[in-house]
Image (tube, rainbow, N blue to C red):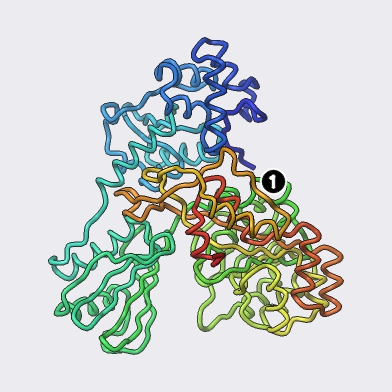
């Protein structure tokens, strides 16, 4: 398992590679780079920004000489220092590393020569990431030479590049270029879906970004026929057919694009789902799951059982499934997935794609004859699939799947409704997990402020019902503003909020007795169960999102 690089004096120490065990702060004080009171100031600041490293905080607060600071940190870590500036970047970064990968790995290649490439990182503790980057450049015929710099420097450079590279939709271009600019602009803006919607006098283009639809362009009505024709041509749809159709666009090497058409009163509407072909699997903790490896093991490392993830459409269920699989995957086990469609191809997994001719239940029957250890079923949709999945769990397999319902306890109700017996639920269901995605405040434009009394009362008024009360001393929230970086939304990216129901013996007993979800919920709460709202409040108090955003998802006031 990978551990993040943490610079703190309180409890976590440097390196998992045994280069040094002394906390960085102490080393910096010993070397005379900063004073003890500077470290204390940084640690106080870190309480409000727990994801920030002490070294980065010192740099951002303008404490100490930046060159001396990065030189000392690099020496402690056994790395090469680099206070990277725009003048030091002598290559086009995107030619060597896609900007989204650069952002994810906090890495900037800045110079090449003699078969080598110099790359600046803000985190060199993630060995898997470093190895992946080394192999990526090696495939380009380049040996990676790594340097270290501050996180905020990486962010500033990448942000300026992302803004500069953003595509624009040229509504006056010819049809081929127009369609291309609509799609590429959506990719640049991190859209998950593109909606092309005919209206009475125009055609509206909207992007779904971080779960919200935003208007990207308005196109003249007289281009509608040509636009529809081009979309059908590149997605391999029937040109004359106006009924609902499904297709795929394969023109963009980094993306699989699923296309759906639907006739409405003004013509044919198209929705394009953008799926990255080789997207990296996020670690479970990166998604917002509690940073507790023991909790993950307790929830997901169980044999002879089934784990179900519950959430409405578009709330990140599949992403969480992939993260769990990545956490559990080992060379000595056989992992098979049954998906509709396969969204991310993962080395070492046997991935099966279902279609109209081959159902989940058909594929699941076949997979059981393939000696699997872990089976991922994209979705439990019907009684047949549920029963086969339960049987698989009862016969020594570990099954992961998703189900559509509002929370982790209502998973039991949903299984009952599709015909699964109480005995099968109690004997096989190990964990049900419910989740939602909330938008993160934009790190570039959010404005920090104290909580109002009304906000405190709303949060604690609800939290007390679940045995939780928050102390707002030294806690801050954020007002969203909007800037170019976040497309003027005030938010950038999303984070998950979670609730977990582990099937204890007492809960199983209630299920077998046929007790209602209300009784099951009461017992679960006695045993420590906390609903989605509590994790949502935790995310608010840690500065990830806002009360207003949480309310838009869960309607709390």
As displayed, is residue 542 above or below residue 378?
A: above
Nearer to the camera, 263 or 328: 263
Q: Is residue 527 left or right of residue 220?
A: right
Element marked by disc 1 = helix
As displayed, is residue 187 above or below residue 234?
A: above
Residue 503 pos. (x, y %): 79, 64
Residue 537 pos. (x, y %): 59, 53
Query: Residue at point 56% right, 65% down?
Result: 556
Assign the N terminus to one quadrant of the image: top right
Query: Residue at point 61% right, 72% down?
Result: 406
Residue 56 pos. (x, y %): 47, 29
**Numbered label tally:** 1
The residue tagged 1 is 293
Query: Residue at point 68% right, 73% down?
Result: 410
As displayed, is residue 197 above or below residue 307?
A: below
Nearer to the camera, 354 or 444: 444
Label 1: few (<14), some (14–19) or many (≥20) C-alpha neighbours in 10 Å: few
Quarter-of-image position of residue 197: bottom left
Residue sticking out furthest to the front: 453
Q: Is residue 181 left or right of residue 148?
A: left
Assign the C terminus to one quadrant of the image: bottom right
Query: Residue at point 44% right, 33% down?
Result: 151
As displayed, is residue 148 above or below residue 297?
A: above
């Amino acid at each position: 398992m990978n551990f993040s690089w943490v610079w703190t004096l309180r409890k976590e120490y440097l390196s998992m590679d045994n280069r040094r065990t002394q906390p960085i702060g102490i080393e910096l004080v010993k070397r005379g780079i900063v004073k003890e009171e500077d470290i204390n100031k940084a640690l106080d600041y870190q309480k409000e920004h727990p994801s920030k490293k002490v070294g980065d905080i010192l740099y951002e607060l303008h404490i100490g000489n930046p060159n001396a600071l990065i030189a000392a940190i690099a020496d402690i870590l056994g790395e090469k220092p680099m206070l990277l500036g725009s003048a030091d970047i002598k290559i086009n970064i995107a030619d060597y590393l896609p900007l989204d990968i650069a952002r994810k790995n906090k890495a900037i290649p800045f110079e090449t020569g003699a078969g080598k490439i110099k790359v600046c990182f803000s985190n060199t503790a993630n060995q898997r990431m470093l190895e992946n980057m080394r192999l990526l450049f090696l495939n380009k015929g380049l040996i990676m030479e790594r340097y270290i710099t501050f996180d905020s420097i990486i962010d500033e450079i990448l942000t300026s590049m992302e803004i500069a590279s953003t595509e624009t939709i040229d509504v006056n271009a010819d049809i081929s270029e127009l369609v291309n600019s609509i799609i590429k602009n959506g990719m640049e803006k991190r859209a998950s879906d593109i909606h092309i919607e005919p209206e009475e006098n125009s055609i509206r283009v909207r992007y779904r970004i971080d779960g919200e639809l935003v208007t990207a362009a308005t196109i003249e009505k007289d281009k509608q026929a040509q636009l529809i024709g081009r979309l059908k041509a590149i997605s391999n749809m029937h040109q004359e057919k106006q009924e609902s159709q499904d297709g795929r666009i394969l023109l963009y090497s980094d993306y699989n694009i699923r296309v759906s058409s639907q006739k409405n009163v003004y013509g044919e509407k198209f929705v394009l789902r953008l799926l990255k072909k080789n997207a990296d699997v996020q670690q479970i903790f990166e998604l917002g799951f509690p940073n507790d490896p023991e909790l993950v093991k307790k929830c997901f490392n169980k044999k002879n059982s089934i784990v179900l993830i519950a959430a409405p459409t578009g709330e990140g269920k599949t992403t969480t499934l992939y993260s769990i699989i990545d956490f559990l995957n080992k060379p000595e086990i056989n992992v098979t997935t049954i998906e509709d469609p396969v969204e991310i191809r993962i080395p070492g997994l046997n991935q099966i794609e279902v279609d109209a001719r081959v159902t989940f239940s058909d594929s699941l029957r076949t997979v059981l004859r393939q000696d699997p250890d872990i089976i991922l079923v994209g979705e439990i949709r019907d009684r047949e699939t549920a029963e086969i999945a339960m049987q698989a769990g009862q016969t020594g397999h570990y099954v992961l799947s998703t189900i559509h319902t509002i929370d982790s306890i209502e998973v039991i109700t949903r299984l009952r409704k599709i015909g699964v017996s109480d005995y099968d639920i109690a004997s096989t269901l190990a964990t049900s997990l419910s989740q939602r995605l909330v938008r993160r405040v934009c790190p570039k434009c959010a404005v920090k402020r104290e909580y109002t009394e009304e906000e405190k009362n709303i949060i604690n008024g609800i939290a007390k019902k679940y045995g939780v009360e928050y102390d707002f001393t030294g806690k801050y929230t954020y007002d969203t503003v909007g800037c170019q970086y976040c497309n003027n939304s005030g938010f950038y990216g999303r984070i998950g909020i979670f609730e977990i129901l582990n099937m204890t013996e007492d809960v199983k007993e209630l299920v077998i007795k046929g007790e209602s979800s209300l009784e099951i919920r009461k017992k679960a709460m006695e045993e420590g169960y906390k609903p989605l709202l509590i994790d949502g409040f935790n995310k608010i108090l840690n500065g990830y999102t806002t009360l207003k955003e949480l309310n838009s998802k869960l309607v709390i006031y």
